[in-house]
């Protein structure tokens, strides 16, 4: 694999990756163990989307994550696990131990009926067994679908149903800050409507009292005692599914983004090594939850492919107090730290008294991901955490892209606060106007599209390929549309300005306005609702809901509480609106379309300049909404 060490080399490699993509990506794939080498590197079509990489190649990603490293790294730490409560004993796993656990759990899965191609749902907090569960699925060729532990029973069941999962792997409970969350109870509730599930494997984490369903539920520890650690890695086609991960779009229910084995392996590894400039024996810490793509790619697969040592963390940045991140960095001498702007802003707000007692002198590279980072947060991170010595890589990418797409290369690319800077090799961004015309040159702004495939691009949306086509490939024919707006400055640097569709980014969590609206509308007294995002100091975006209630005399506070409970029940507490305004009507055009532009302005506190309202069916509604703005 080629490693970029200077900006001149970046430009050369970039050019080579565009002029000769197949040669370039073949080279990046050479170092891996392939059970059979590919016949052709790439076959693609963005019109009726069909993208194949490393065609005919056979591999198993876990052999490349684990077995391949054993001769040199058997006793190297693969993971330091830091528990939620700092008083609890931390645990570590060497590559050899991790390999053994993965093989054993893979045998547990087989014993419980899992076969290649089966879908397995994983619903767990950030415990080491979560990593083991993912890799065990991949070992036997089962497709994992991790559902973030913060989602509700109802959100869990719809994800299990969508991909017909056969097995669920869960914990009894989860510790999150001072809370104890009854995960198994949520699983039981979800499974009332999931007939496809025949087994539940339960890891005991909190020793909470749980109900075990005879014939269906088994304990992780009991099962592990019954198996040995010999488990040959299943040969997988490069284009066989590796995993499904659900993410929100602007319409309908969350969709299952499909990633496949070969391309995902090559691309996540390439970006990890280059963007972070990972050096042997360094300690890497990505704070993301494995329930999201950042955790899949940069807590699990990429660091293991690189033979790195990582930290995984069960807790939250502010528990027991806002010094936790800095304490953990000193404890494990973390060299590369990768987190989200929302965490940086929250810790900045907590004040420097939480930072100053810590050395933070092991740090070499800082990363940011998940949402636009504002200049102030960037500068604070740079000054107080990186001590102005650590390059900050602001990495732009998405669930659908599998790996980082536009990002500085640490120490190579000159950074600029708020800018993801330049496309990584192989990535061809284009900006287009509303009509899809490419906007050339610098100092311009438009909708961000990518015009050529990279190895870890989304292959499909599970069970509904047409949806994948409609979502990403139809808006601008011949291009992959990201859903993001973007500016390219005078120097050709990219700055992501945020979503241009109805997707919100709340504390780095991607949530569709339609999803929240449909959850609110489940409330018996609500006839209609409209949800928009507004700028929020810590969360990046907050959720503002306008709701119409059928009962005119209903107590407003009681109604708000009930709505919050409804959203928590249908989606999870991450989607709770920050503001709920009760209105008697919504601004609609004569054709019945809600004018969200107006609602967005109201939510932003911009009440004077609402733009043209002449096409509204009932302009008086706007005055009422303005008068009641929160
Ligand atoms: O709007 C962009 C924003 O997050 C969206 C993707 O969300 P998700 O699929 O959940 O993946 C997040 C982690 C990769 C994007 O469409 N986003 C992500 N990274 C950045 C960003 N916006 C600005 N700057 C970033 N670095």
Image (cartoon, helix red, strand yellow):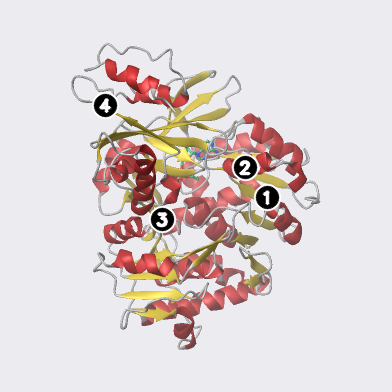
Q: Mark 2 touching mark 3, by CB under 8 A?
A: no
Q: Which residue is mark 4?
A: 585
Identify the image quadrant of the C terminus. Answer: top left
As helix, strand or loop, the secondary structure at mark 1 comes to loop
Q: Which residue is mark 2?
A: 346
- Residue occupying image coordinates x 62% and y 42%: 346
Local crowd at mark 3 within 10 Å, few (<14), some, or many (≥20)?
Answer: many
Residue 110: image location, x then y, percent: 38, 79
- Residue occupying image coordinates x 50% and y 19%: 444
Q: Is mark 2 within 8 Å of ligand 1?
A: no
Is label 1 or label 4 in front? 4
Please tell me which of labels 2 and 1 falls first in the chain. Answer: 1
* Nearer the observer, 155 or 408: 155
Please tell me which of labels 1 and 4 falls first in the chain. Answer: 1
Question: Alpha-carbon distance for marks 3 and 1?
Answer: 24 Å
Q: Is mark 1 within 8 Å of ligand 1?
A: no
Q: Is mark 3 within 8 Å of ligand 1?
A: no
Q: Mark 2 touching mark 1, by CB under 8 A?
A: yes
Please tell me which of labels 2 and 3 falls first in the chain. Answer: 3
Q: Which residue is mark 3?
A: 151
Q: Mark 1 touching mark 4, by CB under 8 A?
A: no
As helix, strand or loop, the secondary structure at mark 3 comes to loop
């Amino acid at each position: 694999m080629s490693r970029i060490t200077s900006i001149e080399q970046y430009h050369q490699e970039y050019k080579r990756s565009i002029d000769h993509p197949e040669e370039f990506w073949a080279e990046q794939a050479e170092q891996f163990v392939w059970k059979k080498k590919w016949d052709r590197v790439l076959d693609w079509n963005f019109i009726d989307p069909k993208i194949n990489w490393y065609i005919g190649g056979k591999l198993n990603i876990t052999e490349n994550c684990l077995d391949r490293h054993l001769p040199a790294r058997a006793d190297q730490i693969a993971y330091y696990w830091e528990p939620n409560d700092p008083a609890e004993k931390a645990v570590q796993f060497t590559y050899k131990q991790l390999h053994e656990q993965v093989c054993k759990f893979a045998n547990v899965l087989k014993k419980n009926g899992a076969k290649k191609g089966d879908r397995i749902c994983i619903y767990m907090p950030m415990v080491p067994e979560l990593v083991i569960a993912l890799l065990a699925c991949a070992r036997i060729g089962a497709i994992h679908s991790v559902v973030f532990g913060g989602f509700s029973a109802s959100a869990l069941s719809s994800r299990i149903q969508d991909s017909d999962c056969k097995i669920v792997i869960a914990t009894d409970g989860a510790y999150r800050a001072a809370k104890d969350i009854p995960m198994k109870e949520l699983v039981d509730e979800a499974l009332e409507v999931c007939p496809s599930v025949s087994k539940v494997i339960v890891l005991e984490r909190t020793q909470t009292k749980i109900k075990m369903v005879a014939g269906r539920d088994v304990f992780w520890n009991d099962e592990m005692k019954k198996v040995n650690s010999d488990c040959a890695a299943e040969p997988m086609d490069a284009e066989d599914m590796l995993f499904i991960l659900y993410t929100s779009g602007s319409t309908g229910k969350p969709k299952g983004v499909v990633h496949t084995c070969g391309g995902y392996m090559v691309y996540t590894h390439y970006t990890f090594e280059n963007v972070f400039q990972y050096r042997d024996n360094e300690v890497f810490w990505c704070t993301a939850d494995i329930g999201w793509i950042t955790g899949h790619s940069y807590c699990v697969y990429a660091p293991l492919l690189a033979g790195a040592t990582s930290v995984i963390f069960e807790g939250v940045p502010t528990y027991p107090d806002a010094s936790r991140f800095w304490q953990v960095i000193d404890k494990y001498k973390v060299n590369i730290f990768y987190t989200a702007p929302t965490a940086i802003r929250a810790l900045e707000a907590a004040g420097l008294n939480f930072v100053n007692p810590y050395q933070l002198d092991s740090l070499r590279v800082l990363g940011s991901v998940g949402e636009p980072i504002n200049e102030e947060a960037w500068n604070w991170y740079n000054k107080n955490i990186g001590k102005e010595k650590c390059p900050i890589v602001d990495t732009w990418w998405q669930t659908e892209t599998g790996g980082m797409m536009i990002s500085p290369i640490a120490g190579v690319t000159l950074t600029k606060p708020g800018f993801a800077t330049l496309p990584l090799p192989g990535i061809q961004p284009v900006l287009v106007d509303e009509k899809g015309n490419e906007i050339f040159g610098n100092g311009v702004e438009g909708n961000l599209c990518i015009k050529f495939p990279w190895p870890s691009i989304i292959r499909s949306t599970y069970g509904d390929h047409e949806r994948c086509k409609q979502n990403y490939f139809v808006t601008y024919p011949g291009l992959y549309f990201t859903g993001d707006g973007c500016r390219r400055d005078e120097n050709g640097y990219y700055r992501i300005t945020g979503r241009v569709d109805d997707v919100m980014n709340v504390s780095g969590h991607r949530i569709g306005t339609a999803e929240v609206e449909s959850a609110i509308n489940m409330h018996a007294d609500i006839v209609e609702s409209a949800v928009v995002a507004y700028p929020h100091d810590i969360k990046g975006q907050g959720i503002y809901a306008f709701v119409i209630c059928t009962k005119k005399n209903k107590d407003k506070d009681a109604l708000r509480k009930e709505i919050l409970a409804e959203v928590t029940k249908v989606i999870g507490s991450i989607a709770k609106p920050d503001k709920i305004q009760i209105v008697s009507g919504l601004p609609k055009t004569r054709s019945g379309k809600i004018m969200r532009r107006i609602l967005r302005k109201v939510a932003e506190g911009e009440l004077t300049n609402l733009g043209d309202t002449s096409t509204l069916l009932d302009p008086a509604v706007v005055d009422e909404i303005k008068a009641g703005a929160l």
